[in-house]
Image: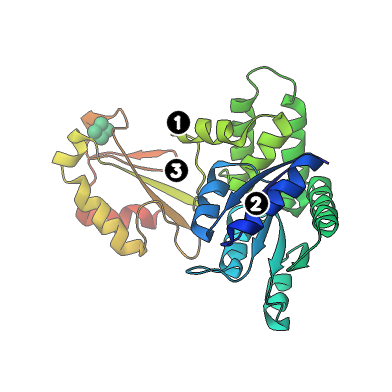
Amino acid sequence: MSGNVLVVDDEPVVLKSCDRILTPEGFTVKGASSVKEAMGLLQNGDFDIVITDLKMPEMGGIDLIRWIKEQNPATGIVVITGYPSQETIKDALHLGIIDYLPKPFSPALLIDVASKAVSFVKSKGVEEIKTEEHDVSEKANEIKNVIDTNRNRPGGLIPVLQQIQEILGYLPPAVLRLIARGLNIPVSEVHGVVSFYSFFTMKPKGKHNIRVCLGTACYVKRSSEILAKLKDLLGIEEQEITEDKKFSLETVRCLGACGLAPVVVVDHDIHGAVDPVKVSEMIREYD
Ligand code: FES
């Protein structure tokens, strides 16, 4: 059985044992001694399953499970704990863990549970992937088709990202993992391309996306006042989305229309010589 496994436990002996038991079985195992360390590894790596202790200093396993469910919902979770109080396990099950291992566990039990969890995760498709703001499952077939069409095409990553962003409006982390798996490339490569090109975004956008230029020509013509006014009117900060999902707000450095400064772009509409006092009139046009 092959699969990428992250073990999270504050006891070094547990990390060592899991590595010693699972590596000869074909798993690739990494260890984290805290929830914080685990989050860092999960942000930069592609793990099929996380095997986590529940009781740890600072942040506990339940916090980690909640975080994984938001950030990487396709990752399978197995819980290990020496304190299997019914309430804690109930919470973990409610959050969608795959399985549970009581401490101390035998090597055979660990191998069995890890193998079943990895098989379960690998058999799941995009249908299972939900993100905080978006149920991706609605678009499962479209996403699958895009990946399948480009699977063996050299240079297929950028077209895949463009098409999937067109379908979903953004590229959530769970979908980046799915693309990496589908194209058989490291998730770090996918993430690197998304971060490099400004037209890719991992954040959802509102129905209307507002971009305020803070480039020099616009800045000297008070675009920071326009931004402050928009924040105030919409009740959001940059890179955020209003509660009704109607507007999202971004800043950019020069839109190449300096002669029209200060410039605000709403969706594809360019508004030039924007007067900070008239900003509310400008966004009122957008329903
Ligand atoms: S500085 Fe704003 S468009 Fe160039």
Q: Secondary structure at mark 2?
A: helix
| Residue 50 position within the rendered picture, expressed as x and y whole percent measured from the top left | 67, 54
Residue 155 visible: yes
Q: Residue at x 44, y 48 (%)?
A: 209
Q: x and y percent of residue 118 in the render?
A: 79, 49
Q: Which of the two discs, 1 and 2, sits closer to the camera? A: 2
User: What kind of residue is marked 1?
Assistant: Phe
Residue 84 is left or right of residue 172, and the answer is: right
- Which residue matches tag 3? 267
Q: Earlier in the sequence, mark 1 or mark 3?
A: 1
When the figure is inspected, residue 76 is found, relative to residue 165, above or below; the finding is below
Picture coordinates of residue 228, whole percent (x, y): 24, 56
Who comes first in sequence, dot 1 or dot 2?
2
State the CA–CA distance, disc 3 to disc 2.
52 Å
Q: Amino acid at mark 2?
A: Lys
Q: Earlier in the sequence, mark 3 or mark 2?
A: 2
According to the image, label 2 marks what residue? 16
For this orientation, the residue located farthest to the front is: 13
Q: Is residue 225 left or right of residue 256?
A: left
> Would you say the residues marked 1 and 3 are in contact, meaning their CB atoms lie under 8 Å apart?
no
Q: Which residue is mark 1?
A: 196
What amino acid type is highlighted by mark number 3? Asp
C-alpha gap between disc 1 and disc 2: 37 Å
Q: Residue at x 51, y 32 (%)?
A: 192
Which quadrant of the figure shows ligand 1? top left
How many neighbours does mark 2 have within 10 angstroms: few (below 14), some (14-19), or many (20 or more)?
Answer: some
